[in-house]
């Protein structure tokens, strides 16, 4: 509890590092990226307006070659809006992250809209990051041929919208070994992964966790860990990750750690590893609840979140200041 109170004190004492102009840049890049993917998917003939009425291009199919598990369509639609850039910028400010820090990021293909918001906001704010992504996605995520999350990253780098992206790609699914992919699609995983430099196939869950710790950096090199989706290496298999609430981990998770003391069953995921060592952790899961708590539409009616919606760092979206005109035009 003392550690959590000290952490809150730190959050309230820092100055804001992500400027309104940088947030606006991230949102504009997010919207541009969405338009590029929508155009390509229309041309490919695998876009369904019934699934994607907000015209984001970021809603996949109920089934697809990279599908690992069932997903909720409303959650995927809610994740596909530019307003997540504002929420992420707010959260970065709340924990005092600046361009002098380095952020570790892990993501599955389940919420491509939030993946985009995380990377584009970090890049707009000139905050260094290291990212590991997985190929797998739950239904309605980035689960279609030619539009997996690694493929989307590659497309956006070629177009100059995304500067960096992920440095390592893994299969995803159960134990990060593509368990959970539909059987007829498993044979395509190797071929797909070979397209991306830095791809790696762990032999078990513990190695999947160790790989990410190696790529992201150990405790002294990171200031924040962000996870998007329910990747097995992030949540682990010992109970903590599945019970941790989405958002900025805090008092509830300290209580959860205390409750799990003495239990040594399963593999500790990255959420527990970094959080238990006192590092701020942002976990994007339970997306509809998070969006409601920050005032984001559930689901949105358009890809660009309404300009008059501004998020408050203490659970809702920050009130506009003198410079906020650039953000809300």
Image: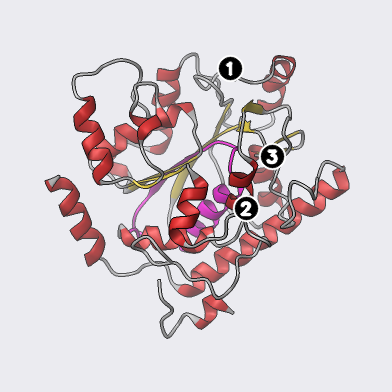
Residue 279 in picture, x, y percent from top left: 27, 44
Q: Quadrant of the C terminus?
A: bottom right
Position above or below: 88 against 165 = below
Location of mark 1 (residue): 179
Q: Quadrant of the N terminus?
A: top left
Q: Is residue 16 left or right of residue 78?
A: left
Q: Are marks 1 and 2 in contact (CB under 8 Å)?
A: no
Mark 3 or mark 2, which has the lower sequence index? 2
Let me know if residue 12 appears in the view. yes
Foreground disc of the pair 3, 2: 2
Residue nearer the viewer, 144 or 140: 140
Classify residue 219 by image quadrant.
Answer: top left
- Name the outermost residue toward the bottom: 322
Q: Residues within 10 Å of mark 3 (few under 14, many from 20)?
A: some
Q: Residues within 10 Å of mark 2 (few under 14, many from 20)?
A: many
Location of mark 3 (residue): 151
Residue 184 in picture, x, y percent from top left: 75, 15
Classify residue 138 by image quadrant.
Answer: top right
Residues drawn in magenta: 97-126
Q: Is residue 260 left or right of residue 78?
A: left
């Amino acid at each position: 509890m003392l550690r959590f109170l000290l952490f809150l004190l730190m959050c309230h004492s820092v100055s804001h590092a992500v400027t309104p102009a940088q947030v606006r840049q991230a949102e504009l890049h997010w919207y541009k990226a969405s338009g590029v993917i929508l155009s390509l998917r229309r041309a490919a003939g695998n876009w369904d307006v019934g699934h994607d009425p907000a015209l984001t291009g970021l809603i996949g199919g109920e089934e697809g070659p990279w599908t690992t598990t069932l997903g909720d369509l409303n959650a995927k639609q809610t994740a596909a809006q530019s307003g997540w850039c504002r929420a992420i910028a707010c959260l970065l400010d709340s924990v005092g992250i600046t361009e002098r820090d380095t952020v570790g990021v892990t993501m599955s293909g389940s919420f491509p809209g939030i993946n985009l918001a995380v990377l584009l906001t970090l890049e707009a704010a000139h905050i260094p990051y290291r990212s590991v992504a997985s190929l797998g996605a739950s239904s309605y995520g980035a689960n279609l041929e030619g539009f997996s999350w690694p493929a989307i990253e590659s497309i956006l780098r070629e177009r100059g919208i995304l500067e960096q992206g992920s440095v390592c790609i893994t299969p995803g699914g159960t134990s990060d070994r593509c368990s959970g992919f539909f059987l007829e699609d498993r044979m395509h995983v190797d071929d797909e992964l070979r397209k991306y430099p830095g791809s790696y196939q762990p032999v078990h869950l513990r190695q999947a966790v160790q790989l990410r710790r190696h790529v992201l950096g150990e405790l002294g090199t990171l200031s924040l860990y962000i996870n998007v989706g329910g990747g097995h290496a992030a949540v682990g298999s010992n109970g903590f990750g599945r019970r941790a609430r989405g958002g900025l981990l805090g008092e509830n998770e300290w209580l959860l750690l205390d409750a799990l003391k003495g239990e040594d069953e399963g593999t500790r995921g990255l959420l527990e590893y970094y959080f238990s060592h006192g590092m701020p952790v942002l976990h994007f899961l339970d997306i509809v609840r998070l969006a409601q708590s920050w005032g984001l539409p559930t689901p949105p009616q358009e890809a660009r979140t309404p300009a008059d919606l501004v998020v408050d760092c203490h659970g809702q979206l920050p009130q506009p200041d003198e410079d906020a005109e650039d953000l809300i035009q």
